[in-house]
Each structure stands twice: as C-alpha cells, then as structure tokens.
Image: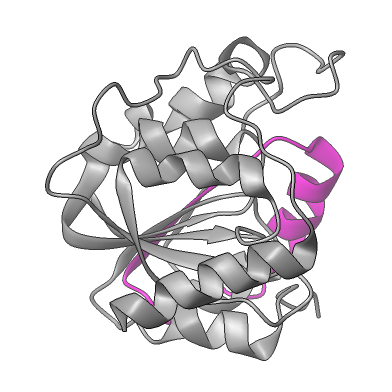
C-alpha cells in the first residue's frame, strides 16, 4: 500500500480537521488521496504526473466506496528558469479547480505551483476553511501566501514541515497575483532560522 509521505505529526495536523462531512481538495496526489478520502464526504485531487496518476488510480480501485474526483492535468510548459513555478507553466493545473463547481472545507497543497494554487483557491473556500501547505516552513518562497492567509499552526521540527492556514479577514496591501514571477518574493535563510521564525509565529497564534 502507498503510504502518506508525511511525518505522523504533519498528518495528524490534517486529520484533526477531517470528518465524515468534510469536502476536501488537494493539489498533488499520493498516499494522502487514499487515506484521507476514506474519512471525508467528498475528495477532489489534481495531479500533473501521468505515471503517478495511473498508479494512484489503480490503488483507488481498492476503495470503491470513497467519493473521489481525480483529475490528471498536464503541465503547460517546462520550467527552464530554475525558479518557482509560474502561471503559464501550470495554468491548466492551477485552473482545474474552476471545473469542480464546489467549495471546500479543507485544502491540501502539496503539488506544483503552490504559491499560485493558494491564491487561486480563495473563491472556493467555505467560511472557516482550512488550507495546508506541505513543506511550508523550509521553503521560504511559499511564505508569500501570508499576503492572504493567517498561519494558525505548523509543524516545524520534522524533515518536511507543514503550515496550517485560515483566510485573513483583510488581505495585505498589494498582495501578489497569479502573474507572480518565479524569481519574485524570494528570500534565503538557513533551515534553523526558518524553523525558529515560524515556530515562534505559530506559538504566538496558539
């Protein structure tokens, strides 16, 4: 069986928000698709890698009672610049959420173009929805999502880390948009600094 590729503490942070009434979306499929879809009411997943999509599709056949909408959406253009993914590279993948006609209680962003997926999903969030971004603490370019989201909890001591967010009541002035360039809003710091900064931030919220 394909396992959810997360530390148990990261996974537990997500599991705390799931129940039989939850409608959940993820960008980036895997063991999470198999495990979390058994708990929630409806599960939507978007994947860009055809080989991985086929593998997870086969696994999902073992869970016929799970209500899973699973979409393969190919990358539009290769990232030849070596920076963060840009909209034109994953336009269809980012925009696939438009085709679901659904609002979500929980969103897991664990695939490509995470900064842009976080922006795109905003109109599709239910009131009090929770958004998770895997690998958040150590990948400092992702921190721009705090233009729109409040970091309400996080796991900082694991290898990958994760951030838990709720939408801000008021966004920052001039927040980033979907045309954010891959080399914009970047910052460099050590893993130790990143863990320290976000660890303190989460403790202040808690």
Residue 102 position in % (x across, y down): 24, 44
Answer whether residue 199 is magenta in the image: no
Residue 42 as seen in the image, left or right of residue 68: left
* Depth order, front residue of 137/55: 137
List x then y, in percent, for residue 154.
50, 74
Relative vertical location of residue 151 with respect to residue 63 in this rendering, above or below: above
Q: Is residue 9 above or below residue 24?
A: below
199 vs 180: above or below: below
Q: Is residue 147 above or below residue 184?
A: below
Residue at 31%, 71% (x, y): give it.
41
Of 148 and 199, nearer the camera is 199
Q: Position of residue 1 (x, y in %)?
A: 81, 80
Q: Magenta region: which residues?
A: 39-65
Q: Position of residue 88 (x, y in %)?
A: 61, 10
For the image, the number of numbered tags is 0
Q: Is residue 23 visible?
A: yes
At a point 53% along the width and 67% down the height, the residue shown is 198
Residue at the spot 66% in from the left edge and 62% down from the top edge = 194
Question: Is 169 positioned to the left or the right of 72 in the image?
Answer: left
């Amino acid at each position: 069986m394909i396992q959810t590729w997360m530390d148990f503490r990261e996974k537990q942070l997500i599991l705390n928000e799931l129940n039989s009434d939850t409608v959940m979306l993820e960008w980036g499929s895997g063991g999470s698709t198999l495990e979390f879809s058994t708990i929630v009411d409806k599960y939507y997943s978007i994947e860009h890698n055809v080989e991985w999509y086929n593998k997870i599709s086969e696994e999902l056949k073992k869970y016929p009672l799970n209500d899973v909408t699973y979409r393969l959406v190919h990358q539009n253009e290769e990232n030849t610049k070596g920076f963060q993914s840009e909209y034109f590279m994953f336009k269809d993948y980012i925009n696939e959420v438009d085709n679901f006609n659904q609002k979500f209680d929980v969103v897991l962003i664990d695939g490509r173009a995470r900064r842009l997926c976080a922006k795109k999903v905003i109109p599709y969030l239910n009131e009090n929805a929770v958004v998770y971004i895997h690998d958040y603490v150590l990948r400092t370019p992702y921190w721009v999502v705090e233009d729109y989201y409040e970091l309400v909890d996080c796991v900082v001591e694991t290898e990958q880390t994760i951030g838990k967010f709720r939408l801000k009541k008021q966004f920052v002035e001039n927040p980033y948009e979907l045309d954010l360039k891959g080399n914009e809003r970047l910052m460099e710091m050590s893993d130790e600094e990143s863990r320290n900064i976000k660890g303190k931030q989460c403790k202040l919220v808690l």
